[in-house]
Image (cartoon, rainbow, N blue to C red):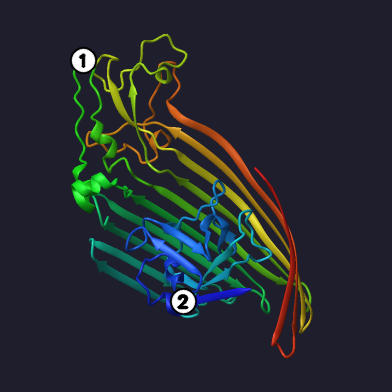
Amino acid sequence: KSRSSITNDYIERQTPGQTILENLNLLPGVSFTNTDPYGNSGGNLRLRGFDSQRVSLTFDGMPLNDTGNYQIYSNQQLDGEIISRANVNLGTTDVDSPTASATGGTVNYITRKPKEEGGLEAKATYGTFNYKRLFAVVDSGVQGPNETSAFVAASYTKYDKWKGPGELEKKQFNARIYQPLKDDDFVSVAFHYNENRNNQYRNPTMAQYEQFGKNFENERTFVTPTVRPGVADSAPAANSNYHGVRINPSNTGNLRVQSSFAINDSLRLTIDPYLQYTLANGGGYTTFREIDPRLRGTSAAAGVDLNGDGDVLDTVALYTPNNTNTWRPGVTSSLLWEIDEDNRVRFAYALDYGRHRQTGEASYLDADGNPMNVFGGRGGPKVETADGNHLRTRDRLSYAILNQVSAEYTLQALNDDLRVTAGVRAPFFKR
């Protein structure tokens, strides 16, 4: 295996708020490209030519690749200030990598432990494009007779897009409680929540670039629709490119438990359950005629008056995001048997159970052309159809279930100059 690592000493010296994947760019074989200077818009990861859908990304051993398409979302990762280290396997996966798609390598980063000494750390950062970031973490230090320790951290980032109108905003909260037990045994509970509110970057055609330059998006402003009773009004065509509906909101969070217990002098058991949550979409803008069959449904009504002008003659723009909501419980566990100083065996089991709900509830735009709720009808006012239902563009439920067993043998010989690892991995995946 070819394995590389970076530690917190290096991460601390990089641009505050930058995604951990950008910090891995110095490693041979790793290529990460950001969509913007500070990382809130996401990016693209490659490991020795393999794209991100073929790379296993794990956070404290918990899989982060999307359960639907195995993508990696770099703008939703843990704040660098509380990452202890990040490891990269290039060209091969660990035998116990808990993902059905990992063939090109693995990236795993680890949350730091709470510090033994209590204290407060705070940072404020300012940069071009009106970049502003605040970060703070409070460590409790070791407390009480059980030597419990904890930290709580929060960050807020906001800045302008480097081309075109719109902003990128991010909020994140983290906490961890660490409880040592006898000898090297321990139990840890950690919490993570990340919220992104981003306007997307649009890719111009050559003709648009030649006409407007890199700031061509500034030419697309919201045009207030005309509303006239008894007249067939249309939604202005230019509004389909308005930056207020080209957004990428996401709410993600997880709860992680880690534990390690010595059964005897040669056997150790680790059990790490987790629960993940995701709600996200890529924005959306669709025009509907008020007599559209999807609005009438099973009703005999002529249509639905969407803009309130008293007729059903118009074509009206609605906000139509495709929401993805995932609940994802799982567990990774290992039984480690140290036969002697030079021989070790590890047996592992992983369960990853993704409930993948995809809905497209339409909602309304406000007077300025912005969504009344960034998650459409899921969180805001729904568009009621004539037959009493609500307008939606998709309605799907799927499950991605991984059960995986693996075994690994490690031999160290010749005064540790030779190390041989052999393993077998059997993933059983069902969608």
Residue 143 in sight in this render: no
**Where is residue 95 drawn, in percent x and y?**
69, 65
Q: Residue at x 43, y 70 (%)?
A: 23
Find residue 35 and report its image quarter: bottom left
Find residue 21 and report its image quarter: bottom left
Q: Amino acid at mark 1?
A: Val
How far apart are the alpha carbons under marks 2 and 1?
64 Å
Residue 224 in sight in this render: yes
Q: Which quadrant is home to the C terminus?
A: top right
Characterize the local packing of mark 1: few (<14), some (14-19) or many (20 or more) Cα atoms within 10 angstroms.
few
**Where is residue 27 drawn, in percent x and y?**
48, 74
Q: Is residue 403 left or right of residue 376?
A: right
Which one is in front in this view, the residue at disc 2 or the one at disc 1? 1
Q: Which residue is mark 2?
A: 8
Q: Is residue 290 left or right of residue 224?
A: right
Q: Is residue 143 left or right of residue 225?
A: right
Q: Amino acid at mark 2?
A: Asn
Q: Earlier in the sequence, mark 2 or mark 1?
A: 2
Q: Which residue is mark 1?
A: 231
* Mark number displayed over residue 70: none
**Where is residue 205 drawn, in percent x and y?**
29, 45
Q: Is residue 149 left or right of residue 416?
A: left
Q: How many marks?
A: 2
Q: Looking at this view, name the residue that lies furthest to the right.
A: 339
Q: Taking 184 as reference, is 383 above or below it?
A: above
Q: Looking at this view, name the residue that lies furthest to the bottom.
A: 415
Foreground of the two, 379 or 339: 339
